[in-house]
């Protein structure tokens, strides 16, 4: 069997037999555990609850309602069938003009109409995933690098590097200032890359941040724009969570606003990645956008988009939906309202058992601080705790190490991909676990992290307890969870 596989592999490319896709990360292992035994309130009440999937499922009712009222937009209905032929015939890579116009308008609306987007700069891609790869192909050669502030979305390791040969260089951010991107952290990463003879072509930021659930303030964004201008490198801004900012105290500031104000900035260096996967909760539609201020990049990316076009049926539907101002305004407002409530309910539930989270106001997740539960401040200890969370509490959350976080003990918990009752089950499991530990634990003094905020967490997971659990379940902290190689790697 092994020899057979070796023979088969000899006939394949290095890419086909390599692991550049990154499926060996714990981030994906958690999904596999969920896929094998998913929670169901009646059939599998003890199943794994999926809290590793950044999906926005809180407003499907609004979209369904719109679809019912606008049957013409779906061409596969008696009302829409007359549009079938025009939609099904060949479409070139420019996209339907009405789709680009609707997307440009939507992008402006999501950014409070403080900035306008030009439909002629809208380039399609297969989700933000495709957009990131296309932009990497346009801006860098194999071996070149992008700086990326940590912690960052693990999919970037696949999307920007796997097929392009581009590298990512971490910009180390720390909890001591709430993971802010500072000029000195950027300078350090840039210098270290240069010392290793790595050519840095760009900086990739995610605003609002996945996994932090925070937004960049205007001052930080200005600093970033001046940094990339000074170094003459590109800036790629992933803004796919732009409409998920749910408190009005701090508005989302897009890089598009900053460069509009900054007349000195070289706009040719600035590119935005966007998609409808998070803001509209439509990841299955694969609507991704590259918006570049650089004509040559627009040109090249548009040609490349042949490899990942949005189907004309989807363009047709989205054009109709996003042109409906009343629907869009209501959707954006309701989505923020529901995300806000979900975030409050969940973080307050955690507070009751003295678990803190980073203070966030955006995204579909919370960045949960469990460093005081670690037996020591190491990534091995983080993995041990993560295995307990998956296998005992039966929650698929993602460990900070898979986001390249520089400090152990952080976990990303997705909160918008489930209904209220599932969230309640998840919270009650966490509460039970914390209470059990509280009863059994003797408090161990841990070297506290330097956090800006006061931490009230007093619990610690005893080493014995983790090991007991592991041995009862025949596991070592490194035991891989069995999985099918065909499990789809979703993000
Ligand atoms: C920051 C970020 N960029 C890109 C993606 C990929 O999005 P899409 O589904 O549009 O490909 C994700 C998905 O989680 C993400 O969090």
Image (cartoon, grey):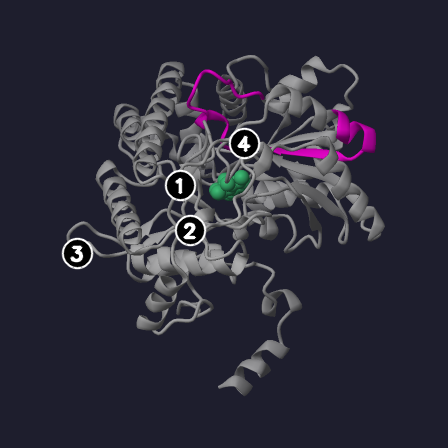
Q: Are marks 1 and 2 in contact (CB under 8 Å)?
A: yes
In the picture of the structure, the residue carrying the numbered disc 4 is: 452
Looking at the image, which is closer to me, 227 or 405? 405
The first of marks 1 and 2 along the sequence is 2
From this view, report whether residue 132 is shown above or below residue 325.
Answer: below
Q: Is residue 250 part of the magenta span, yes or no?
A: yes
List the residue tagged with mark 2. 373
Instruction: State the image coordinates of residue 153 (x, y, percent, origin top left).
Output: 54, 44
Which numbered disc covers residue 43?
A: 3
Disc 2 or 3, which lies upstream in sequence? 3
- Give the Cα separation between the discs numbered 3 and 1: 35 Å
Please report the bounds of the magenta region as a residue range.
Answer: 226-253
Q: Which comes before the other along the chain, label 4 or label 3?
A: 3
For disc 4, the neighbor class at 10 Å (few under 14, some 14 to 19, many from 20) is few
Assess whether mark 3 and mark 4 are in contact (beta carbons under 8 angstroms).
no
x and y percentages locating residue 379 in the rendered image: 54, 57
- Give SS at disc 2: helix
Write down the quadrant of residue 54 in the picture.
Answer: top left
């Amino acid at each position: 069997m092994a020899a057979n596989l070796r023979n088969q592999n000899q006939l394949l490319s290095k890419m086909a037999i390599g692991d550049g896709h990154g499926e060996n990360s714990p981030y994906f292992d958690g999904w596999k555990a969920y896929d094998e035994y998913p929670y169901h309130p009646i059939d599998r009440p003890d199943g794994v609850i999926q809290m590793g999937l950044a999906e926005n499922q809180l407003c499907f009712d609004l979209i369904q309602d719109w679809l019912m009222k606008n049957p013409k937009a779906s061409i596969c209905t008696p009302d829409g069938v007359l549009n079938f032929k025009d939609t099904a015939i060949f479409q070139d890579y420019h996209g339907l003009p009405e789709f680009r116009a609707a997307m440009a308008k939507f992008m402006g609306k999501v950014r409070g109409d403080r900035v306008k987007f030009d439909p002629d700069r809208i380039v399609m891609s297969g989700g933000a995933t495709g957009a990131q790869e296309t932009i990497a192909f346009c801006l860098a050669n194999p071996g070149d690098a992008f700086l990326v502030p940590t912690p960052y979305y693990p999919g970037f390791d696949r999307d920007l590097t796997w097929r392009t040969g581009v590298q990512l260089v971490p910009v180390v951010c720390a909890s001591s200032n709430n993971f802010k991107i500072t000029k000195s952290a950027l300078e350090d990463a840039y210098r270290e890359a240069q010392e290793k003879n790595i050519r840095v072509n760009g900086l990739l930021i995610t605003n609002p941040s996945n996994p932090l659930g925070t937004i960049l303030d205007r001052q930080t964004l200005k600093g970033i724009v001046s940094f990339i201008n000074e170094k003459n490198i590109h800036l790629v801004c992933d803004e796919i969570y732009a409409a998920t900012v749910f408190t009005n105290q701090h508005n989302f500031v897009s890089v598009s606003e900053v460069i509009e104000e900054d007349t000195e900035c070289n706009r040719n260096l600035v590119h935005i990645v966007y998609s409808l996967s998070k803001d509209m909760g439509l990841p299955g539609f694969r609507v991704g956008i590259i918006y570049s201020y650089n004509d040559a990049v627009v040109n090249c990316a548009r040609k490349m988009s042949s490899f990942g076009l949005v189907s004309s049926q989807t363009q047709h539907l989205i054009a109709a939906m996003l042109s409906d101002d009343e629907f869009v305004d209501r959707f954006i407002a309701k989505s923020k309202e529901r995300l806000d409530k979900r975030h409050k309910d969940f973080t307050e539930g955690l507070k009751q058992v003295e678990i803190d989270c980073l203070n966030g106001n955006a995204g579909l997740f919370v960045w949960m601080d469990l460093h005081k539960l670690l037996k020591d401040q190491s990534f091995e200890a983080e993995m041990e705790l993560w295995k307990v969370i998956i296998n005992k509490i039966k929650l698929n959350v993602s460990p900070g190490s898979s986001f390249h976080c520089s400090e152990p003990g952080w976990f990303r918990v997705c909160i918008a991909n489930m209904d209220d009752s599932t969230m309640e089950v998840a919270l009650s499991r966490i509460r039970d676990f914390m209470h059990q530990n509280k009863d059994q634990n003797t408090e161990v003094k841990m070297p506290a992290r330097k956090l800006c905020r006061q931490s009230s967490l007093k619990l610690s997971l005893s080493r014995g307890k983790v090991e007991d659990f592991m041995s009862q379940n025949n596991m070592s902290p490194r035991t891989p969870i069995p999985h099918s190689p065909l499990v789809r790697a979703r993000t």
